[in-house]
Image (tube, rainbow, N blue to C red):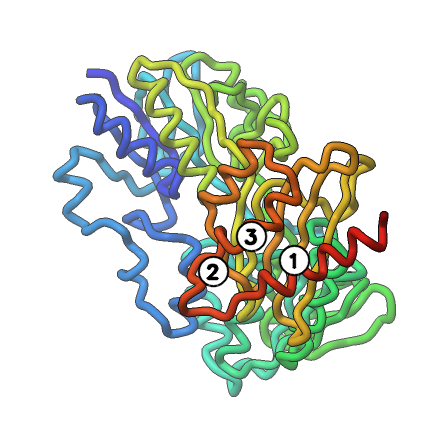
Amino acid sequence: MEHIIIIGNGISGVTAARHIRKMSDKRITIISAETDYFFSRTALMYIYMGHMKFEHTQPYENWFWKKNRIELKSGFVSTINHQSNELVLADGEVMSYDKLILAVGSKPNKFGWPGQDLDGVIGMYHKQDLEKLEEYAPNNKTCKRAVIVGGGLIGIELAEMLHSRNIPVTFLVREKSFWDGVLPAGESAMINRHIQNHHIDLRLGVNLKEIVADSTSKVKSVIIQETGEVIDCDVVGLTAGVSPNINFLKDAGIELGRGIKVNRFLETNIPTIYAIGDCAEQHEAIGNRRPIEAVWYTGRMMGETLAQTICGNRTAYKPGHWFNSAKFLDIEYQTYGWVFANPKEFEQQFHWIHTDDTKCITISYHKETSEFLGINTFGIRMRHEVFDRWLTEKRDVNYVMQHLADANFDPELYATHEPAILTSYKKSQLQSA
């Protein structure tokens, strides 16, 4: 019986296992050292905030795996020998495979800061990070202040988590405005104000110089590079992005870049080895997408796609139109298609912001053809399937603006803003005519 080994029990690896099982009787083994069972990584923050317990983040009952003949193995893989189709665990155990799927995920970035490995320095990616946070920041008596380094989505989630327990937060962001490499200026500025309105000490355009230890090798303070300012704190969250978890593959003969290099079929340079999820790096980016995408839904899609190939139906990975969603404290964010932080030469953007400073949209369209290219929405819930269809149909921006109400997620229960948006859009068109 063909043996499929999957390293990693995140959304990519587990989705691949489930779909391989649906289509075959192959032997399947998932190896992971993080947790015994699959859990929803995006829900970690809600455990700390008291909205759910860890077991609530597990989509499947513990009996599911045995019933579906998916073997679970706890351990670290230290070596892969592709010539013999074997891998070696950290405890010395050798396992053989016929096909190997690398779904090893990411690790938090560290940039060689002095003190970056002290007690009280955490990431917010693994279950172990959550456990450390509970240890070092259970309340605002044990943790008088936390400092977060890095202004992406994980950083704002960690800020919200700590804020929920009334722990003062200083937020160090290298960029001049929050997430301004992704968000257009108007949106980024609104999120800056929203963070500050929640009494979070947002510091823009600054870098971490050093994390200082106390006499017990625990965090005592941080020093800011530009000013030399010392900020006393008990916890430091390193949230300056993530990188593929590939260090253990350096001598495995697998082609590596920033991640594990794959083609459109998620195949590596070794015929029996594949990579999926946010450790996989496309040789050539798909459209405007980045070669590596640390996004939950693309990991799931890769798992589904690769299962087809593993089961004899070789299938290319086609992620479709870009979309994503997130939350900036209590403002929901959705994006469909492409709205660039720095508009391309062919791109025109229309921006609308509500007077309450918590809702806005930015619509992107082609200057010459008026083709709708994408939309960002903040504080207004929209329907994915509607925008996905409009992007596929290459709708004109004027059509989108006239029919924007069709995409409203729940117009019966929420205030609608489409008339005001359309009026503002028409005014902007007149001014630019």
Q: Which numbered mark, 2 or 3, is in the foreground of this view?
A: 3
What percent of the width, then of the height, locates residue 362? Answer: 67, 54
Q: Is residue 69 left or right of residue 333?
A: left
Q: Secondary structure at mark 3?
A: helix
Up the image or down, 224 lies above or below 391; here it is below
Residue positioned most to the left: 67
Q: Residue at x 59, y 32 (%)?
A: 394
Up the image or down, 101 lies above or below 411; here it is above
Q: Is residue 78 left or right of residue 38?
A: right
Mark 1 or mark 3: name the one nearer the start of the chain.
Answer: 3
- Amino acid of disc 2: Asp
Label 3 neighbour load within 10 Å: few <14, some 14-19, many 20+: some
Q: Secondary structure at mark 1?
A: helix
C-alpha span from label 2 to label 1: 45 Å
Of residue 219 and residue 390, the one placed in the foreground of this image is 390
Residue positioned most to the bottom: 141
What percent of the width, then of the height, locates residue 238? Answer: 62, 59
Of residue 86 and residue 426, the one placed in the foreground of this image is 426
Q: Are marks 1 and 3 in contact (CB under 8 Å)?
A: yes
**Residue denoted by label 1:** 422
Mark 2 or mark 3: name the one nearer the start of the chain.
Answer: 2
C-alpha span from label 2 to label 3: 41 Å
- Amino acid of disc 1: Leu
**Residue denoted by label 2:** 129
What percent of the width, then of the height, locates residue 157? Answer: 54, 64
**Residue denoted by label 3:** 404
Q: Is residue 68 left or right of residue 54?
A: left
Label 2 neighbour load within 10 Å: few <14, some 14-19, many 20+: some
C-alpha span from label 1 to label 3: 9 Å
Whether residue 213 is visible to the viewer of this picture, yes or no, is no
- Amino acid of disc 3: Leu
Which corner quadrant holds the N terminus?
A: top left
